[in-house]
Amino acid sequence: RSRAPLRGALLGCGFFAENQLHAWRELEGVEIVALCDLDAGRLERFAASFSFSPSACYTEAERLFEEVGLDFVDIAAPTSAHRSLITLACAHRVPVICQKPFATDLHDARMMIEACTRAGVSLTVHENFRWQAAVRETIDALRDGAIGEPFFSRISYRSGFDVFRAQPYLASTKRFIIADLGIHLLDIARALFGEVERLGCQTRRVSADIEGEDVATMMLAHASGVTSIVDCSYATRQSEDPFPQTLIEIDGERGSIRLLAGFRLQIDRLRDGRIERTERLVAPSAPSWSTPPWTPIQQSVVRFQADWLAKLKTDDLPETHGIDNFHTLALVEAAYQAAEERRIVIPQRW
Ligand code: NAD
Ligand code: 89Y
């Protein structure tokens, strides 16, 4: 007998929530039964475009939690709203998925993780870049031992794409590219090479029209012995903009991996004294609702959410559970501190 679908609510119905809702609708055994947004107009437009009845729509999360029986909430509201929403979820014993950056600082992060632990509620951070097809193939190639022990990497994201059109709030935030985008690259660095012992960082603001930094270059010393350079820019003008691709280079004792623009995964392996090259396309398959150039991100949302559902069935922790993601957030904090104080910083550990 098939089980009743899990009942979820989407809290925050803005730009990115659309992807999350589309993705839930692609997956079996789950249904978003209620929506919540503080902005009634936005909520109404969102609900209409996804055919929700007005009775499933709430402008106050508290009322939603009181009136709707839920198996989980998916929080796509801004970071500043996360703590109060997670506190409510804990009070109602409802498992949480929460968008990145999940906390405004590490103290906030600790409070939320501890509250969820006390309430016996699972907390998973919606960290999706490591689920992009091309990035996951790169992670798998490294873990399969394709190039032996890695010692150097560059994880790079350079674009001039106008992200402010869909996400205007990014122009007025004091902390921009590391908190918004670098966070994903730092998470990929952790997925590839593990925890970080020391971090240095240089930032710049190139665009005169925004408040925060739009360029950052970080150097990470991983406990595993790998050095990685994590660099990101939204000020890079190129005739062929790779947005939103992350490019990755990894050097290992027995070869090298290159994730190149155009989703080309190139692996050079040392075999019998010679270097042999393989290359394959690791492009994402586009969901029917995808809106290029966002396809790789949109596909990763489906994969992240599918993994969350799968882990629920096996009782395993999703990769980016709260404590795991605390370490990604700690790298973001360390990067800002390193840039501001012009020194190497030791990231906090849980
Ligand atoms: P947005 O401003 O377009 O949407 C956020 C919505 O949340 C707004 O409609 C707002 O009214 C609503 N909201 C605010 N406080 C609320 C509350 N207390 N309860 C209910 N609703 C509330 O923002 P966005 O671009 O959709 O970003 C939302 C989150 O998603 C951010 O944390 C952002 O970093 C993240 N994001 C993630 C990715 C990714 O690839 N993982 C991409 C883009 C954005
Ligand atoms: O908000 C950002 C994210 O998480 O992925 C890309 C993005 O939408 C713009 O930098």
Image (cartoon, helix red, strand yellow):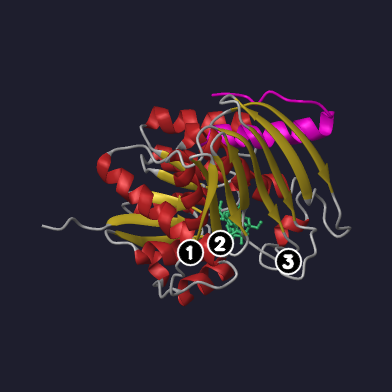
Q: Nearer the viewer, mark 2 or mark 3?
A: 2
Helix, strand or loop: magenta stretch: helix
Residue visible at 40% across and 54% down?
305
Q: What label does residue 263 carry, if any? A: 2
Residue visible at 82% across and 56% down?
210
Q: Which residue bears the numbered disc 1?
A: 284
Does the rendering let one see residue 341?
yes
Determine the quadrant in which ligand 2 lies: bottom right
- Where is residue 8 drawn, in percent x and y? 36, 55
- Magenta region: 325-350
Q: Nearer the viewer, residue 307 or 225?
A: 225
Q: Nearer the viewer, mark 1 or mark 3?
A: 1
- Where is residue 295 drawn, in percent x and y? 53, 67
- Where is residue 150 drawn, in percent x and y? 56, 34
Q: Which residue bears the numbered disc 3?
A: 162
Query: Mark 2: which amino acid?
Result: Phe
Q: CA distance from mark 2 to mark 1?
A: 8 Å
Q: SS of the residue at dot 3? A: loop
Q: CA distance from mark 1 to mark 3?
A: 22 Å
Q: CA distance from mark 2 to mark 3?
A: 21 Å
